[in-house]
Image (cartoon, rainbow, N blue to C red):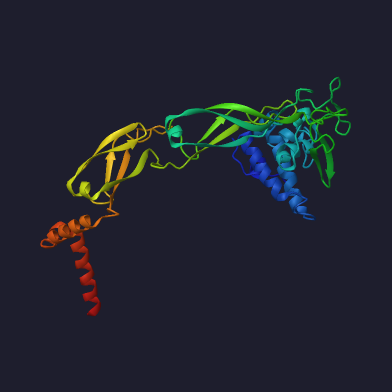
Amino acid sequence: MAKKDYYEVLGVARNASDAELKKAYRRLAMKHHPDRNPGDAKAEEQFKEAKEAYEVLTDARKRAAYDQFGHAGVDQGGMGAGAGAGAGGNFSDVFGDIFGDIFGGMRGGGQQSGVRRGADLRYNLELSLEEAVHGTSVKIRVPTLVNCKTCEGSGAAKGSSPVTCTTCGGAGQVRMQQGFFSLQQTCPRCRGSGSIIENPCKSCNGHGRVQEHKTLSVKIPAGVDNGDRIRLAGEGEAGEHGGPAGDLYVYVKVKDHPIFTREENNLYCEVPIGFTTAALGGELEVPTLEGRVKLKIGAETQSGQVFRLRGKGVRSVHGGGVGDLMCRVVVETPVSLNEKQKELLREFEDSLKEKEHKHSPKAKGWFDGVKKFFEDIKL
């Protein structure tokens, strides 16, 4: 039976890159894996075809020969179906290359497999609104793992050093046979480090790291807001076996402010005004984060009306212009009135009744709407 075209077997174009070849082979290998298809001779044959095609097309010399002469150009090298020998490498090498990330294998991992980057840390920092808007510098105290000073991170007692693991021979990986396949896994004795600490350091009990608190100075840029984070590179936990340290992420939480609330670059506040000021207009001082400013209240101002003070908001750390301060006025009803004040208000109310619709247009419109509503119900 004539052999199938290798490109057709993998389902790729003839100019496919090595990455495309690997992706195609991985998909087919997972699909036709003999362990996933026990007793299925067809699946096993398809797996062998895919393997053979992958081994040829990922070898530059063999691929060139195949492109020029077809199967005749590579069969002379002993690349028969299921051979997997010679310059094309053995089956385990190809399997480890494709599935290493699934089964935890590392080709030629050596002692580098024990090097691990330290964990990233998170610190939640509460700031006042003023600190978040203007920026500041704060000191924080962070619990973390640092390299043991006694053993300098090796984990071995002073005067000794780790020895090569006899189980994996220092590779950090062991090869295990599972049915049709030979798999690489992390060495269970040294856990991938390739070495064993026979005489552990008493300060860190052989871990190479100890827990400490360190104090850091953090510069908070102006304009940060809730959820923003500041990255301090290398200030996380120390790495293992010489690995790099992780990072520290400072997450910002802005405390509630007694006057202002923030929405993006704008600030909002409520300004209580008296009945007389609302009716006749006037001027009053309102606070901003930069100091006090004058706010002009127009005559006949209604409760809930919003006045905009441009440029009195926030400039975000993420860019953009300065926001505005939005002042929502709330007309405050007088309280604790004496009898004379109450009488004056009654006289004032009586003076308005003659032309009530003129002085309270919203109230008249609302009552007219209510009256019409009930009339419609009666129909």
The answer to whether residue 5 of the structure is visible from this angle is no
Instruction: Please give the name of the residue rendered at 56% of the width and 34% of the height, measured from the top-left corner.
Output: 250
Q: Is residue 169 above or below residue 299?
A: above
- Choose top left, top right, bottom left or bottom right for residue 14: top right
Q: Residue furthest bottom?
A: 379
- Left or right side of 82 for 233: left
Front-lying residue, 281 or 125: 281
- Choose top left, top right, bottom left or bottom right for residue 26: top right
Q: Is residue 222 above or below residue 274?
A: above
Q: Position of residue 74 (x, y in %)?
A: 73, 34
Front-lying residue, 41 or 357: 357
Indicate the quadrant containing the C terminus: top left, top right, bottom left or bottom right: bottom left
- Left or right side of 70 for 224: left
Q: Position of residue 69 (x, y in %)?
A: 68, 33
Instruction: Please give the name of the residue rendered at 46% of the width and 36% of the height, measured from the top-left corner.
Output: 128
Q: Position of residue 241 (x, y in %)?
A: 75, 27
Q: Residue furthest left?
A: 354
Front-lying residue, 294 or 93: 294
- Left or right side of 308 for 215: right
Q: Residue furthest front?
A: 339
The answer to whether residue 348 of the structure is visible from this angle is yes
Instruction: Please give the name of the residue rendered at 32% of the width and 39% of the height, measured from the top-left corner.
Output: 325
What is the count of numbered marks?
A: 0
Q: Position of residue 208 (x, y in %)?
A: 77, 28
